[in-house]
């Protein structure tokens, strides 16, 4: 062995040794970083105000609470927790935010569900038992914001809810007088993480939290009154008192103090028209399973390749206001009903003769500008014996501007929806009213009230994401439906899948549709499904080709047989 060989062997040895030492140091330092309990006595999220739809349940003297935060890991000792909590105020009510952390890549929620933190929660509760002032415990907040500032974010909403319920039930056993606080930021989709009425006493909303300022999925709202109204609106299904939390930014906190009374006044102004339509038990509702026969099968099929298939009972027709004015709606509606088919009628409130870009079509609806057009439309419906599934201003929750009713104030949307569905002095018996979100995050912000809705509709497409172009990577019907079904749990109505489709080679389409048939058969809340047999509008897809969901007639018939066989 020559000297050069020995030299290289020594180099390799020392590099390996250094890597091993570094790894062990990293492990020990990581363990130290998560095992250290941190208590912040004056947590930089002061309580700035409170609100309650039911004034008898309001939190008294909330702005004088002391807000503290404690961060714990599995390795945190009882002595450290006890010592940290002795710093809490004994003369003020205490809001305590508990944050659970772990080593890198750990699923902290699953660990909590598995009971790994039970002993730490018991120590916290025991340490707080002697405090005479009210105790409010807030656990792993801002869970709904799609960032990774905290290890419990960007996780399953079902898993979060399960973990929260474990925390709340264990805490109530050990510290019965504690008030349990569910603490979303109030970001779109917060309601998906709701753990249930029985384990929550109070809700907190944080204004301009670090998590929310990092998020990019939705545009930041600069108008403080609008921001506060939207946050309060997002938790309107949960009849719990609300704490409004600020941040370490003094300017933000001052703005919240100034505009919170304005936001509350504007919210209460809509009490009779929007908030009074929410059922008292809506927070624990699910879509209603009412189907007793085979589901209704429909198609959107402008090229008329599938609509003559025997299973088809309903056709989907999209119209704008200009189509009603120029007679095209009457012509197409008559052609469908002549085939003895029912109609899913999606009304898009734009493109009337006077339409110009930038028109606020929702306010125009509320103010009666389109009433003469609605009169003409309803007249056509009243002269038909076919069932009409009437859908108005669909996919309103998607944060884009493909349609002028998207990215709008949900209260204004709801009032416009109610105006359209309540148009006329007599409700038509052949008309079923459909509220039609896509089923995306935050859908129920736009819920207009159960008194004007007979069915919910959602859209389920294989390959709905512009970042996915490989059909093999698209989600299954069952995966998409489970997510959207969960989002509809506050709206106690059956579901009509008024749009669905899949892109790809025929064998992949057949596999995807077999899964769809299985879901439809096993979910009795689905009263119908309508296949979208066309390519999407290319203008909506930018630089990539629009997905084409067209399918072979035999593939479609095979799908319908799978359903009718049940």
Image (cartoon, rainbow, N blue to C red):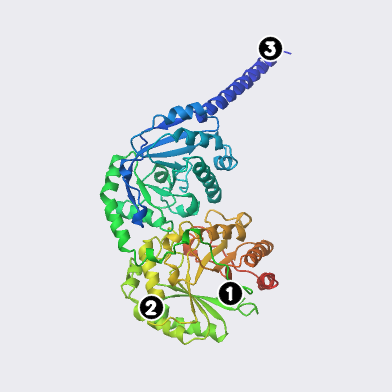
Which secondary structure, mark 1? strand
- Residue 134: % across, % down: 38, 41
The answer to whether residue 429 of the structure is visible from this angle is yes
The secondary structure type at the circle numbered 3 is helix
Q: Position of residue 243 (x, y in %)?
A: 36, 48
Residue at the spot x=52%, y=86% of the render?
A: 385
Q: Relative to 359, does residue 52 appear above or below in the rendering?
A: above
Residue at 38 percent across and 81 percent down: it is 424
Q: How crowded is mark 1: few (under 14 residues within 10 Å), some or many (20 or more)?
A: many
Of the pair 377 and 331, the residue shown nearer to us: 377
Q: Which of the 4 image quarters holds residue 39?
A: top left
Q: Disc 1 marks which residue? A: 298
Where residue 40 appears, as percent x and y from the top left, is 39, 32
Residue marked by disc 2:
423
Residue displayed at 47% across by 49% down: 144
Answer with left or right where residue 6 lies relative to residue 374: right
Residue under pointer 3: 3
Q: Residues within 10 Å of mark 3 (few under 14, many from 20)?
A: few
């Amino acid at each position: 062995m020559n000297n050069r060989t020995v030299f290289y062997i020594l180099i390799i040895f020392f590099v390996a040794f250094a890597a091993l030492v570094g790894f062990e140091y990293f492990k020990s330092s990581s363990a130290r970083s998560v095992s250290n309990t941190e208590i912040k006595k004056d947590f930089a999220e002061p309580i700035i105000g409170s609100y309650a739809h039911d004034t008898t349940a309001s939190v008294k003297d909330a702005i004088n609470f002391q807000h503290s935060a404690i961060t714990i890991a599995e390795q945190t000792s009882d002595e450290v927790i006890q010592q940290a909590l002795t710093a809490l105020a004994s003369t003020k009510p205490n809001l305590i935010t508990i944050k659970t952390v772990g080593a890198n890549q750990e699923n902290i929620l699953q660990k909590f569900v598995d009971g790994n933190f039970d002993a730490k929660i018991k120590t916290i509760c025991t340490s707080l038992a002697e405090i005479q002032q009210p105790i409010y415990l807030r656990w792993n907040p801002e869970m709904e914001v799609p960032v990774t500032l905290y290890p419990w974010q960007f996780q399953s909403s079902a898993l979060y809810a399960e973990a929260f319920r474990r925390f709340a039930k264990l805490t109530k056993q050990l510290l019965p007088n504690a008030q349990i606080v569910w603490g979303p930021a109030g970001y779109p989709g917060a309601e998906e993480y709701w753990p249930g009425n029985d384990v929550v006493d109070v809700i907190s909303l944080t204004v301009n939290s670090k998590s929310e300022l990092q998020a990019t999925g939705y545009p930041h709202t600069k108008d403080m009154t609008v921001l506060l109204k939207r946050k309060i609106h997002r938790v309107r299904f949960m009849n719990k008192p609300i704490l409004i939390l600020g941040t370490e930014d003094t300017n933000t906190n001052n703005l919240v103090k100034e505009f919170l009374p304005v936001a509350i006044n504007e919210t209460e102004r809509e009490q009779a028209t929007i908030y009074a339509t929410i059922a008292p038990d809506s927070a624990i509702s699910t879509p209603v399973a009412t189907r007793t026969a085979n589901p209704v099968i429909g198609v959107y099929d402008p090229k008329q390749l599938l609509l003559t298939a025997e299973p088809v009972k309903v056709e989907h027709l999209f119209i704008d206001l200009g189509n009603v004015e120029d007679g095209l709606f009457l012509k197409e509606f008559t052609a469908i009903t002549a085939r003895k088919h029912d109609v899913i009628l999606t009304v898009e409130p734009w493109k009337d003769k006077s339409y110009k870009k930038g028109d606020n079509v929702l306010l125009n609806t509320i103010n009666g500008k389109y009433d003469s057009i609605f009169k003409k439309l309803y007249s056509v419906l009243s002269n038909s014996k076919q069932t009409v599934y009437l859908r108005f201003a669909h996919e309103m929750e998607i944060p884009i501007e493909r349609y002028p009713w998207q990215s709008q104030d949900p209260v204004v949307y709801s009032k416009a929806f109610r105006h359209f569905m309540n148009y006329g002095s007599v409700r038509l018996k052949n008309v079923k009213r459909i509220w039609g979100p896509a089923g995306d995050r935050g859908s129920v912000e736009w819920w207009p009230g159960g008194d004007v809705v007979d069915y919910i509709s959602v859209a389920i497409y294989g390959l709905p994401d512009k970042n996915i172009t490989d059909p093999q990577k698209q989600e299954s019907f069952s995966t998409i439906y489970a997510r959207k079904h969960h989002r509809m749990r506050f709206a106690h109505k059956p579901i009509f899948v008024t749009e669905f489709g899949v892109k790809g080679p025929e064998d992949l389409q057949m596999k995807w549709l077999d899964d769809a048939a299985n879901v439809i058969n096993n979910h009795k809340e689905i009263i119908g499904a309508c296949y979208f047999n066309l390519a999407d509008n290319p203008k909506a897809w930018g630089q990539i080709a629009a997905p084409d969901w067209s399918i072979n007639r035999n593939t479609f018939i095979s799908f319908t047989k799978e359903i009718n066989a049940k």
